[in-house]
Amino acid sequence: MKPWAAPWTFVGPALFVVGAFFALPVFAALLLSLTDFDLYALANLKNLRFVGLGNYIDVLRTPLFWKSLANTLYFVVVGVPLSIAASLGAALLLNSPLARFRGFFRTALFAPVVTTVVAVALIWRYLFHTRYGLINYALQHMGLAPIDWLGDPHWSMPAIILFAVWKNFGYNMIILLAGLQGIPADLYEAARIDGATRWQQFRHITLPSLKSVMLLVAIITVAGYFQLFAEPYVMTRGDPLQSTVSVLYYMYEEGFKWWSLGRASAIAFLLFALTLLVTRALLHFSRRGEQA
Amino acid sequence: MSARSASVLVNVTLMVAAIVVLFPLLWMLSVSFMQPGEASAFPPPFLPAHATLANYHELFERAGMGRYLLNSLLIASAITLLSLAFNLSAGYAFAKLAFRGRERLFQILLGALVIPAQVAMIPLFLLMKWLHLVNSYGGVIVPGLATVFGIFLVRQYARSLPDEMLEAARLDGAGEWRIFLGIVLPLLKPIVVTLAIFTFLASWNDFMWPLIVLSDQHWQTAPVGIAGLAREHQQDNELMMAGSVVTVLPVLLLFLGLQRYYIQGLLLGSVKG
């Protein structure tokens, strides 16, 4: 074997897999989104026609697409800050020198992250049950009226957000905890000597030091939450009144229920473009904030 | 606030948070042992009046859960073992072997990380159909054989290996693969364990792609299987909780056993993002 060839025997197999089963399909999706690929084309490729931007225009004219976009944005805009707040709160507690049994608490709070989303969504579907659910039981104890969590279009998305926060906050908690542990202790020492209160220390030392970690966490979480799918699939099937149809759920139904694969590809690209736009914007504004 | 009351506040809050977080999992376990119908009551019972394995019997005898779990185990194990081979060799080469276009290729791979997997799924389905891999283990395993994330993780770790040691082995006339298998691989052991548990958990828990490519119940994985059962058995809470227990328990136990490696991988993977 020639010496220059050896490295390619190392990277070749992995590059082939990534190329053939990821890069190629991504390019194919772009082409597919410009065709009317449907059940007829699936049977016989002769039925395939090029439609240009027709799918995109079509999708943008469909009310259900805008509904699914609004639902997804609701999930992202409310769910991401809540998740990160929960993660930060838990990380601060775990990082406190006063905390005991930290290893145990860290494991306990992290446990939902490694569970199977479908399986735990079933638990929460039951917890949210209008008549037998423990959450309504708890509300009743507090003197509140029961809520038809998964049956009332006003409450279905909040219910899914609560579930998602529970499931995911542990992930960012670990990253933020590592960030907190990286802040030099003498910063706090100096602040204490200057008479800074706990809140002032948090506001002027902790938060600024966590800035880059927070940005990372925000980007990972936003990108992840835009991919909402399994939760509504298991808990609500997009109902009630399509209040939990996410963009990805809409794509799945268009593609694999109605076999409009061209349209579904267009939806996938619209979602990708939106995710990219929002994460780039986050990056951009945080950089501008640094210069100011 | 005195130091003592601050300490009580911190620890009590942690305790309450842990109870709230763990409660759904414990309750799942408790309900799975209840008599069919027992949990459909108000107020919901916390513990089974007479613990029974009836739901587990039903699950395995009639609902085909054993088959789903076997499918999951085989698929997740195959993906883990095979992707380790692909990702380890590629990640090491990107870190330590010189070849033309190395940096550029790696930048392109990193760039691909921003593309969500769902974008590729529709053509991937057509590709799998063409390869006759729809409704087979291969349909789930093949696209998971190598991941950009895995390559990235291994490269990050392998960069810290000393070059002098590799050079010395080359001077002794050892081939690149012998160096990799004999010298490098043992040194990569921590990242091998990390990547293995990461991959296994991700494959076990994966939902959307297996749902798409495995429409035949015979081949479905545990998450896809219980999602289907949940649609048929809307009211059978006890049965569904038993299904959730057997799906979640394997990964939860695996995580508890190897959590040090898992957490390390999580941090290493998010360093650069």
Image: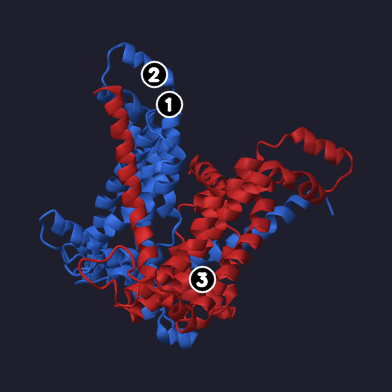
Q: Which chain is red?
A: B
Report helix, strand or loop for mark 3. helix
Are discs 2 and 1 located on one and the same chain? yes
Numbered mark located on residue B182 in the image? none
- Tell me whether circle 2 and circle 1 mark residues in contact (CB < 8 Å): yes
Q: Chain of mark 2?
A: A
Q: Secondary structure at mark 1?
A: loop
Q: Tell which residue pokes out farthest to the top in this image.
A: A193
Task: Pinpoint the chain carrying mark 1.
Answer: A
Nearest the viewer among A231 and A93 is: A93
Q: Which hue is chain A drawn in? A: blue
**Residue at position x 37%, y 64% in the image:** B30
Q: Disc 1 marks which residue? A: A183
Q: Nearer the viewer, residue B150 or B38?
A: B38
Judged by depth in the image, the label closer to the viewer, 3 or 1, is 1
* Label 3 to label 1: alpha-carbon separation: 45 Å
Give the number of the mark in front: 3 or 2: 2
Name the kind of residue labelled 2 in the image: Leu
Q: Residue A187 has which mark?
A: 2
Query: Which residue is at the front of the view, B123 or B228?
Result: B228
At x 40% / y 38%, what residue is drawn?
A176
